[in-house]
Image (cartoon, rainbow, N blue to C red):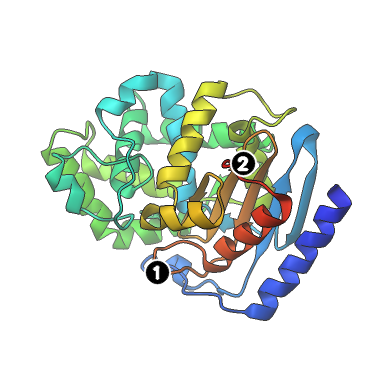
Amino acid sequence: MTDALKTFLTDLDLDIRAQGDWGQVADYIPELGRIDPAQFGIAVALPGGGMVSAGQARQRFSIQSVSKVFSLACVLGRIGEQIWTRVGREPSGQRFDSILALEHENGRPRNPFINAGALVTTDELLTGRAPKETLAETLGFLRAAAEDDDIHIDKAVARSEAATGHRNAALAHYLKSCDNLRNPPEITLGTYVHQCAIEMTCEQLARAGRVIAQLPGAPRMLTPLKARRISALMMMCGHYDGSGDFAFRVGLPAKSGVGGGILLIAPGQASIAIWSPGLDGYGNSRMGSHAAERLAHHMGWSVFG
Ligand code: GLN
């Protein structure tokens, strides 16, 4: 199977590059705005430790909102179900940085994967800890899950987002005004932008995702129930207001980030990471989504049978 998969991924990489319909990079974060959109990498982690990849699968990129999956995993490990008093688990149907629903719903964000929701989970993780220790926990989770210590934060990206992140600041202050932020907004925001600025390669991210896919041979860091629940949230909320379309086209739980990364989970079968930094109108990787659709169809991977 790995030889056939390698051939498929190599052809897919060539096709994607030939198409060249890359989309726009996330220039609202100036440091990400400088990245060449014409890039693509894909890595598939398989049961028992196999890894098949193609394109720029060893190139580091900013995981951005993909980190929200792992900060949620850390929060669930720490306080479990209690987190749902502070954040919901419904699709938002709105942009990732929207403030609209937050006012209607009295400061309880719709889910942990939109920015307002991730600010709340990061704020929860900060309870009783300094920002450095909190970031060390999320990084530590990723390193243990990927079985690779060479995963770090790109401070230039964090600084760049901190300097221009007025929307996230508005969200944090709104949450604070509703009594749903424990720390000073600057502290939660500073921790959040550093968490989003974690850099990984597709191969590292696919390896980390094995703990959610519950692949045989992966470190046992999540109970099956937690992994199922995180996957359910990825399916419903992982691509923001593009989540329905992504589920329709691909049929796998997945989480995107504005760095152009997508982590996909084929439960028990594979953990897949794709990177292409050009985005569509929802802020999801354009060519990454296309590649995900092609791979899922080719392999017959879908949670819908
Ligand atoms: N750090 C980014 C932001 O807050 C993450 C958004 C994303 O990846 N969708 O805007």
Q: Which residue is mark 1?
A: 281
Q: Which is nearer the eye, 216 or 66?
A: 216
Which quadrant holds residue 281? bottom left
Q: On screen, 248 above or below 210?
A: below
* Residue 175 visible at all: yes
**Quarter of the image where the C terminus is located:** top right
Q: Position of residue 259 (x, y in %)?
A: 50, 60
Q: Position of residue 286 (x, y in %)?
A: 52, 67
Q: Which residue is mark 2?
A: 305
Label 2, secondary structure: give it: loop
Q: On screen, 233 above or below 153?
A: above
Q: Position of residue 134 (x, y in %)?
A: 42, 32
Q: Which is nearer the eye, 124 or 132?
A: 124
Q: Residue at x 16, y 41 (%)?
A: 105
Which quadrant holds residue 96? bottom left
- Residue type at numbered disc 2: Gly
How many C-alpha atoms fall within 10 Å of the one at disc 1: few (<14), some, or many (≥20)? few
Q: On screen, 179 above or below 253?
A: above
Q: Residue at x 36, y 68 (%)?
A: 28
Q: Residue at x 54, y 58 (%)?
A: 249
Left or right: residue 132 versus residue 36 is left
